Amino acid sequence: MQDVFNFSAGPATMPKAVLEKAQQELLNWQNLHTSVMEVSHRGEAFMKMVAEAEQNLRKLYHVPDNYKILFLQGGARGQFAAIPMNLLGKNQKALYLTSGHWSKLAAQEARLFANLDEIDLLEQGKDTLQVGQLDFSDIASKYDYVHYCPNETISGVEIFDVPNVGNTVLVADMSSCILSRQIDISKFGMIYAGAQKNLGPSGITLVIIREDLLTQTEQSKIPSIWNYTVQANRDSMINTPPTFAWYLCGLVFEHWLAQGGLPAIEVQNKEKALLLYTYLDESDFYHNNVAVENRSEMNVTFTTGDSELDKCFVAEAQEHGLLALKGHKVQGGMRASIYNAMPLSGVVALVTFMEYFANTHKK
Ligand SMILES: *Cc1c(COP(=O)(O)O)cnc(C)c1O
């Protein structure tokens, strides 16, 4: 079989070693002669797996002790609603910093529950997507929290600096950049991510939240599955959790720890992104419209400038074993998602194909 590389933005490619381990353990997990998905989530074996997954994630991501880790359902989008329900307080107002599709959708959903202000981070009147200044320390104290999205998966805009919001709680949708490099978690009140980009399969959502933000009580008028205090008190098991997805996330954490952890992941991610962007800059056939300082290391967008030719690129790439390069429907063009699990060899194969395609389709 030819080597196939899957550039899907999500659900995205998984580390091959993790899939092999899951396959090996599928019919007989922990010597229980059943699969992990057929045992009680409250049983000893599953609870032990969950505790190990949490410990491994704490170690891998250097999660401070005063942060709780929750594994929830409903995807990142569920969190768009849960955040205002849980985090609004004395100001009854939130600030949403927007930089593209997902941050705008987060604000739109939050408006159902919250009074909020929105500030567009993108510089106006530029021909590239560029994020402007990130100092909101003068206005942030009016708000209970400030929300932003450090990596806009669709447009390929990444915000590498952390916004300055003074002492206000900072909340980040890290769905497509979580675990891509070490961050200083103590700068955030809460970070969250749907698992299906960099953590595991879809169906499970990671929330890392500072303990002092669990101010809602068990009696608060928030649906209990969305109440972070309730979920924290019940080990994220107020209802039956997505056990198989949780188990796979645990395998992913174990895998990256064994591979050298975040420092090793970060080196490889930088190398992959540099290779692809360097080629894009040298080429006069393909274009990328993101300012150099905001180019995502996870989602690389490009186009030939001709939508028919772009279609042809995606189809021919697929024949060459390079899958899911079509850009998101709101954006068009191409998008290569090069999350942690994409090996350097996948990006090398992509660049080789891009050169070949440019040579055979030059006008
Ligand atoms: C994929 C994605 C989402 C949506 O995640 P769901 O789990 O499908 O709700 C939200 N935000 C970002 C940044 C994403 O990449």
Image (cartoon, helix red, strand yellow):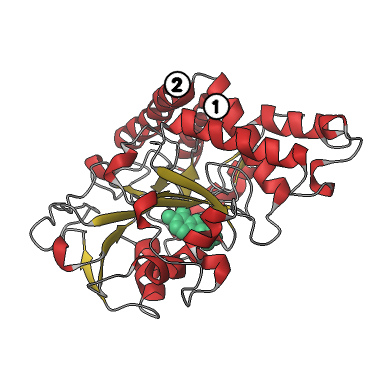
- Rounded to the nearest angstrom, the CA distance separating label 1 from label 2 is 9 Å
Q: Secondary structure at mark 2?
A: helix
Q: Which residue is mark 2?
A: 264
* Location of the N terminus (image quadrant): top right
Picture residue at 25% right of the left edge, 65% below the top: 144
**Residue 133: where, in percent of width, then height?**
13, 52
Q: Is residue 99 above or below residue 188?
A: below
Picture residue at 33% right of the left edge, 77% below the top: 114
Q: Return the disc, 1 or 2, that comes first in the chain's sequence.
A: 1
Q: Amino acid at mark 1?
A: Trp
Q: Which residue is mark 1?
A: 256
Q: Amino acid at mark 2?
A: Ala
Picture residue at 35% right of the left edge, 43% below the top: 296
Q: Nearer the viewer, residue 150 or 170?
A: 170
Badge 2 crowding class, 10 Å Cα cut-off, few under 14, some 14 to 19, many 20 or more, is few
Q: Nearer the viewer, residue 358 or 213?
A: 213
Residue furthest to the right: 33
- Which quadrant would residue 300 be assigned to in this image? top left
Q: Nearer the viewer, residue 315 or 17?
A: 17
Marks 2 and 1: in contact by CB < 8 Å?
yes
Q: Is residue 87 above or below residue 108?
A: above
Looking at the image, residue 320 sits to the left or right of residue 325; the answer is right
Residue furthest to the left: 138
Q: Nearer the viewer, residue 223 or 313?
A: 223
Looking at the image, residue 339 sits to the left or right of residue 90; the answer is right
Picture residue at 44% right of the left edge, 42% below the top: 178
Looking at the image, residue 147 sits to the left or right of residue 175; the answer is left
Q: Secondary structure at mark 1?
A: helix
> Does residue 320 show up?
no
**Residue 15: where, in percent of width, then height?**
62, 32
**Residue 39: where, in percent of width, then height?**
82, 46
> Does residue 55 show up?
yes
